[in-house]
Each structure stands twice: as structure tokens, then as C-alpha cells.
Amino acid sequence: MKLQFTKAQALGNDFILIDDRKGRLKKIGRLAKYLCDRKFGIGADQLLLLNNSRTADFIMRVFNADGSEVEMCGNGIRCIAKYIWDNKIRGQESGIRGQELSIETLAGIIHLQKKGNLIKVDMGEPILEPKKIPVNISSNPPLPPFTKGGRGGINSSIVTEPALSLPKGHSSLVKNFPIKIEGKIFKITCVSMGNPHAVIVEKNVQTIPLNQYGPAIENHKFFPKRTNVEFIQVQNRSNIKMRVWERGAGETMACGTGASASAVASVLLGLTDRKVTVHLPGGKLSVEWSAKNNHVYMTGPAVKVFEGEIEI
């Protein structure tokens, strides 16, 4: 069988995009592993499938390089939106509404807008409740509170606290919570953007051995569905640097949901304002956590690399 595909990237986070609106593909997890392999396949961080939807313009399905299906991909959804706009594809129900699109994902319906050469994504509200992220608090009893750093100590063992910095309706969060990985204690702040993230603040993200700690944190029993891992370095109130270990894909050059989660975590920790530029190895994303409606808005590029055909 010959399979048509498009290779796309957003800040170096690369994807194989397949139009599967006729629903012909089977055993997609196995196919994703083969196609994403950089030695024996095409090579990519994730496989994206475009499908028809009855409730939105289209459906996006996302499969990691290890074959696992995930809920959402912020960079991937910009790439699939560009593909739809470039090819003037009409949706099953509402079609293309000019400069806007709605795309159904396992994390819900995501709305996108063209902004010149960039694409703005309404990522929705961040999920902060531990059970909904999900984070298994009971699997990791709190370590003694830290007494070093921060004003008046960090109190890192606290996971439920007064909702002073929380949006209305939220009663708890996982903030600066300590977990021990290979003899080192990491203070994690957990956020879901439809998929789970563990954000860790460091003085210098370049010195972190991501290949060592990334998979260990990803697969920690604290995270029943595994987690994405972001190490961030706060430069000032408007800029942060980030490196990411993506669940099921390893280190990537960028992660849209990770940048969004990192921006939210930075606000919750009191380190940045609500609008920040996230600097990644592959480039920059603009992220704003709106105080008006609690939604996170991410703006960035998407690029078509090439089209091709592969025998499967």
C-alpha cells in the first residue's frame, strides 16, 4: 500500500501528517512507530492523523514515536491547521470559517486563528486539580519541607493550599512538590493542558542531563498516565527558557502544550507575568494565560517541509 504524507514542523518539533478522512488506516500505533523511526521510516516526533468530525471542523489524532496515542499536541495542531488552510479542505459539518478553525481532540475542541504568518491557539483552561491531571499524590508521601530559598521557606510538601493564586473553582494544586529521582530531589509543579506536565524550575536548563532525568520522571509512579517534563529557567517577568522531555517521544526541540503549562506554572509560582515568551531550542512561542476567562493562548509558526509517498 502506498501512503501519501506531509512532513511538517513547528519550531523543530516535527510531524508526519496523514489525511485519513476516509478512515482507511488500521493498527495506527504500530504504523506510528514505523513511520516515526528516523533510521527505518520517515522520521518524526509524532504522527498526526486528520479525520472528519461531527462536532467540529475536523478531528486531530496524535500518536507518539513509541506508538502511544496522546490527548493533544500544541505544535501539531498548528501544523494540521496550516495543512487544512493551505489545501482549502472543507470540514464535514461547518467547514472552514475564513481565518478560524475548530479541531476536535481527545482533550476537547480546540479553536485556532490565523495571525499573519503565525497561528494562535486557544488552549482552553489549564487543569490544576491533582486527580484530573492526573497526579497520584498517595504514591509519593511528601518529603520534609524545604527551608532553603524563597521568602519564608518553600513549604514544598504542601499540595492543597488556600486558593489565593488559583482560578475560581480550584481548591488544590501540586506546586513545588518534591519527588526524589535517582538521589536528586526535584520540585515539581503539575499542570494539564489536556495532557499532563511536570514543570521544574532550574537556574540553568542547559546543564540538566535531560536524557537521564526525563524518562525517570516521565515514568514515575506519581504519574499514572506518565507525564511530559519541562525544565524551565526564568530570565525575567516576561521571558523563560525551556527544555522538554515529551512523554513517548523523548527530548524535542519544542512543545506547545509544555510551553503553555510552563507559563501557567511560572505564574502560579509568582515568577512571571501572565504573558510570556517561551524560548525553546527550536525557537519562540508567545503564551498568555488570560485573567479574563482563564484560557491559555499560544501563538507560533507552522511550516510545511515536504510531501512524499511511502510504501507500507
Image (cartoon, rainbow, N blue to C red):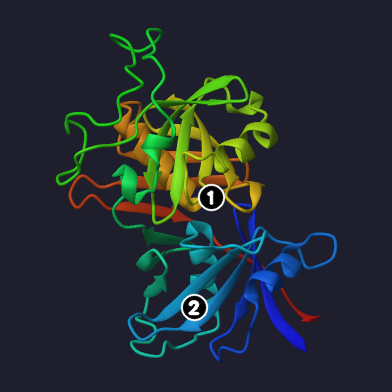
- In the rendered image, the quadrant that contains the N terminus is bottom right
Q: Which picture quadrant has residue 310? A: bottom right
- Name the secondary structure under disc 1: loop
At horizontal 19% and vertical 53% (from top left) the residue drawn is 293
The answer to whether residue 212 is visible is yes
Q: Amino acid at mark 1?
A: Cys
At horizontal 35% and vertical 67% (from top left) the residue drawn is 108
72 and 255: which one is in front? 72
Mark 1 neighbour density, 10 Å: few (under 14) some (14–19) many (20 or more): many
Circle 1 is placed at which residue position? 255
233 relative to 114, above or below: above
At horizontal 38% and vertical 36% (from top left) the residue drawn is 138
Q: Nearer the viewer, mark 1 or mark 2?
A: 1
Q: Which picture quadrant has residue 43? A: bottom right
Circle 2 is placed at which residue position? 85
Mark 2 or mark 1, which is nearer the start of the sequence?
2
133 and 207: which one is in front? 133
Q: Position of residue 70 (x, y in %)?
A: 51, 61
301 relative to 245, above or below: below
